[in-house]
Image (spheres, rainbow, N blue to C red):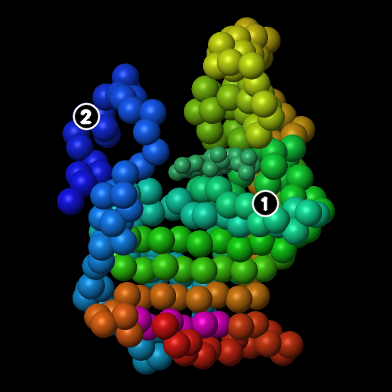
């Protein structure tokens, strides 16, 4: 079995591949043989909440309490005008009945895709809890006031970084970023305003799914779909 995560790989910033060879057949076989049985918990109709937002809050709290790494990290999927989906990780910064909020650069690849197609999907994977939450819906920008309030709560280097990084664009080398950060740091000193191209998005969910791993691949999946009357229809999906 190949040891994927040796100490050196994880901690040595100078560590780089020593071989130009493509991955070995042995690695391919090892990957195919990676298997895990999911045994930690169950998710039944009677122990899930009728409101998916409340169920999400309950699971997020459990993920935080269990100290899973980065419990607030979620994968965001968007689809551009070319109909090609793309994903990236972002951090949830708020959620309530209005939706799920994250912050980013509006001119980034995701920002451009969302400006043409507001439908998106989010996914949390809390590996240690053997749980996944999937959320789908329509995305809109949060208000300028909301973005300002969150921007101003960020550490100074993050606020400067929002100015310095033309997110998703090709840059010549890392030095360009560092120079831009120095430039904006000198320009704004301790009080950078929020860049006009940076702010929040909110996904208003109309579909949720809660997945709990179970033994023998007979996992629990509860789906919630928003009905025309505003009620949530909860259904069990085959794993
Ligand atoms: C754990 C983690 C959290 C991240 N959080 C954010 C975030 O909140 N906002 C953001 O714009 N990018 C975040 N990123 C970087 C994105 O994954 C991505 O590289 C960036 O947004 C550019 O994506 P795009 O080119 O598809 O627009 C995060 C990355 C990781 C690994």
| Residue segment shown in magenta | 219-224
Numbered label attached to residue 8: 2
Q: Is the magenta stretch mostly helix, strand or loop?
A: strand
Which of the marked residues, 2 or 1, is nearer the chain's N terminus? 2
Is residue 221 shown in magenta?
yes
* Front position in the image: 171 or 124: 171
The residue at the point 62 percent across, 69 percent down is: 136
Would residue 149 be seen by someone viewing this image from the given angle? no
Please provide percent x and percent y for residue 106. 72, 40
The residue at the point 61 percent across, 63 percent down is: 121
Please provide percent x and percent y for residue 101. 60, 54
* Front position in the image: 123 or 145: 123
The residue at the point 31 percent across, 49 percent down is: 25
Q: In this view, does 110 lie above or below 154?
A: below
Please provide percent x and percent y for residue 153. 54, 35
For ligand 1, the image quadrant comes to top right
Is residue 136 shown in magenta?
no
Mark 1 close to ligand 1, CB under 8 Å: no
């Amino acid at each position: 079995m190949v040891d994927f995560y040796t100490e050196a790989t994880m901690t040595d910033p100078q560590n780089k591949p020593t071989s130009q060879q493509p991955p070995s057949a042995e690695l391919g076989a090892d990957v195919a043989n990676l298997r895990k049985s999911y045994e930690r918990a169950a998710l039944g109709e009677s122990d899930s909440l009728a409101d998916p937002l409340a169920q999400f809050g309950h699971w997020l709290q459990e993920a935080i309490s269990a100290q899973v790494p980065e419990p607030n990290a979620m994968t965001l999927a968007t689809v551009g005008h070319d109909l090609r989906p793309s994903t990236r990780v972002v951090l949830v910064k708020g959620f309530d009945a209005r939706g799920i909020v994250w912050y980013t650069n509006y001119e980034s690849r995701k920002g451009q895709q969302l400006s043409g197609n507001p439908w998106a999907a989010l996914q949390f994977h809390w590996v240690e809890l053997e749980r996944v939450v999937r959320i789908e819906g329509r995305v809109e920008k949060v208000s300028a006031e909301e973005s300002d309030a969150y921007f101003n709560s960020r550490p100074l280097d993050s606020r400067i970084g929002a100015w310095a990084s033309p997110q998703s664009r090709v840059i010549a080398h890392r030095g360009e970023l560092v120079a831009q950060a120095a430039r904006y740091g000198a320009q704004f000193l301790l009080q950078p305003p929020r860049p006009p191209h940076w702010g929040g998005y909110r996904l208003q969910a109309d579909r949720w799914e809660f997945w709990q791993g179970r033994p023998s691949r007979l996992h629990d999946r509860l789906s919630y779909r928003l009905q025309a009357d505003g009620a949530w229809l909860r259904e069990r999906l085959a794993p």
